[in-house]
Image (spheres, rainbow, N blue to C red):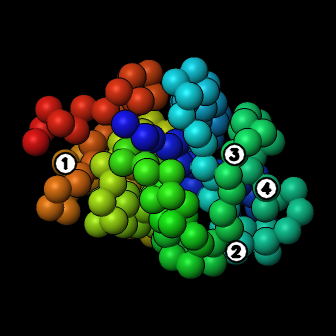
């Protein structure tokens, strides 16, 4: 099965924070888990795709780049976006279709915005999704702590489906590139 590891908005300024925003919850753990899964992807021959948000650091400089501690493979395909949804106006879906991808493993920031919309859009677009439950993060909102937001989305998005395709939530230490979706069908 053709697969891709999709890393969304794991950008320096978004993860570390800036004058207006705090760092994401448990950022060291997030970076470590992203690197663990990148290594698993490399060992499994799974390509990595990164998406960057042009709103982060005004779309330029070190703050806009993928976090310096994340070890992206040199051949990582990168898309820049202007919307919350990684699939909107980026060519991401066309790229995944051209590679005949059927399963996407998703990690990154921010949970309730870009991660949520990517998981839902991927299933609508005919992909099975594995959301890495300990591989996405966010900051506190006015209503919930970052930890509550993450836990809520892990529960809500596990088993989320759109007809034939759905998402499951698994953790970084699991064998993510051996999908378990068929056992639920």
> Which badge, 3 or 2, comes first in the chain's sequence?
2
Q: Nearer the viewer, residue 143 or 11?
A: 11
Q: Nearer the viewer, residue 68 or 101?
A: 101
Give residue 70's position: percent from left, percent from top: 72, 37
Q: In what quadrant of the picture does the N terminus appear?
A: top left
Q: Examine the rendered structure and indicate whether residue 50 appears above or below residue 43.
A: below
On screen, residue 89 versus residue 104, left or right, reads right
> What whole-number distance in Å separates the C-alpha atoms at marks 2 and 1?
31 Å
Q: Secondary structure at mark 4?
A: loop
Mark whose residue sits in front, 3 or 4: 3
> Which badge, 3 or 1, comes first in the chain's sequence?
3
Q: Which residue is mark 1?
A: 159
Q: Secondary structure at mark 3?
A: loop
In percent of the image, x 89 and y 63: which residue is there? 61
Give residue 152's position: percent from left, percent from top: 30, 52
> Which badge, 2 or 1, comes first in the chain's sequence?
2
Q: Secondary structure at mark 1?
A: loop
- Quarter assignment of residue 175: top left
> Which badge, 1 or 4, comes first in the chain's sequence?
4
Q: Which residue is mark 4?
A: 65
On screen, residue 148 versus residue 11, left or right, reads left
Q: Secondary structure at mark 2?
A: loop
Q: Which residue is mark 3?
A: 76
In percent of the image, x 70 and y 74: which residue is there? 55
Q: Are marks 2 and 1 in contact (CB under 8 Å)?
A: no
> What whole-number distance in Å separates the C-alpha atoms at marks 2 and 4?
12 Å
Q: Examine the rendered structure and indicate whether residue 90 appears above or below residue 158.
A: below
Give residue 69's position: percent from left, percent from top: 76, 36
Report whether residue 78 is seen: yes
Q: Which residue is mark 2?
A: 55
């Amino acid at each position: 099965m053709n697969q891709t590891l999709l890393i969304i908005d794991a950008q320096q300024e978004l993860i570390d924070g800036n004058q207006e925003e705090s760092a994401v919850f448990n950022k060291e753990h997030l970076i470590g888990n992203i690197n663990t899964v990148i290594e698993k992807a490399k060992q499994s021959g799974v390509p990595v795709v990164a998406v960057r948000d042009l709103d982060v650091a005004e779309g330029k400089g070190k703050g806009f780049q993928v976090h310096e501690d994340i070890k992206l493979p040199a051949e990582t395909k990168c898309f820049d976006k202007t919307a919350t949804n990684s699939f909107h106006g980026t060519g991401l879906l066309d790229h995944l279709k051209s590679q005949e991808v059927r399963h996407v493993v998703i990690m990154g920031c921010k949970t309730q915005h870009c991660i949520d919309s990517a998981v839902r859009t991927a299933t609508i677009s005919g992909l099975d999704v594995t959301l890495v439950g300990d591989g996405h993060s966010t900051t506190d909102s006015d209503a919930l702590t970052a930890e509550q937001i993450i836990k809520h989305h892990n529960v809500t998005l596990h088993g989320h489906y759109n007809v034939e395709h759905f998402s499951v939530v698994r953790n970084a230490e699991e064998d993510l590139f051996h999908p378990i979706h068929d056992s639920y069908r």
